[in-house]
Amino acid sequence: MDYLSPVLIRSGSLIGCTQNVAFNYVSNSATVSTAVGVTEHGFTLERNAMFMDIMHDFTTLVEGSGDEICLDMPRMDLVRDSCSLIAQAWEQRDFIGTKKVDLQ
C-alpha cells in the first residue's frame, strides 16, 4: 500500500503454483488467474465497516446510553496473554529458504 502515491493505490497480488490472485481494496475487487482462465470477483462492502462498528460501540459505552453493543467482541484486557504469546512467537521466527513475491 502506497500512502504517498498521488493516485490511491491499495492493491496487491499473490502468485502461486496453480493460480494468481490480484486484489484491489479501492475497487473492492479480485482477479483470479488460472490455467483455465481468468475470473473477476467484485465485493460489495464498506472498507471502514469494522472501524465504524467499533467506534459506534465505543461511543455507546462512553455515553452510557444503554444502546445495544456487540458483547462478544474481544476485549483488550482479556487478550493480553494471547497477544504476548503471538509477539514472542513472532520474535522467535526463523525463515529458511526464499520465496519470490510481487507486492505492490
Image (cartoon, helix red, strand yellow):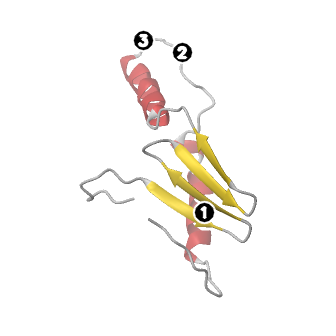
Which one is earlier in the sequence, the residue at label 3 or at label 1?
A: 3
Q: Amino acid at mark 1?
A: Ile
Point out the image quarter for the C terminus: bottom left
Quadrant of the rendered image containing residue 85: bottom right
- The reply to whether discs 3 and 1 touch (Cβ–Cβ < 8 Å) is no
Q: Which residue is mark 3?
A: 65
- The residue depicted at 74 percent of the width and 67 percent of the height is 18
| 13, above or below 10, in the image | below
Q: Secondary structure at mark 3?
A: loop
Q: Residue furthest bottom?
A: 97
Tell me the tag on residue 68: 2
For the residues carrying marks 2 and 3, which lies nearer the camera in this image? 2
| 65, above or below 45, in the image | above
- Going by the image, does 35 lie left or right of 54? right
Q: Secondary structure at mark 1?
A: helix
Q: Amino acid at mark 3?
A: Ser
Which one is earlier in the sequence, the residue at label 2 or at label 1?
A: 2
- The residue depicted at 65 percent of the width and 59 percent of the height is 33
Coordinates of residue 21 in the picture (x, y in percent): 61, 58
Real-space CA distance between mark 2 and mark 3, rounded to the nearest whole angstrom: 9 Å
Q: Which residue is mark 1?
A: 86
- The residue depicted at 41 percent of the width and 30 percent of the height is 55
- The reply to whether discs 2 and 1 touch (Cβ–Cβ < 8 Å) is no
Q: Secondary structure at mark 2?
A: loop
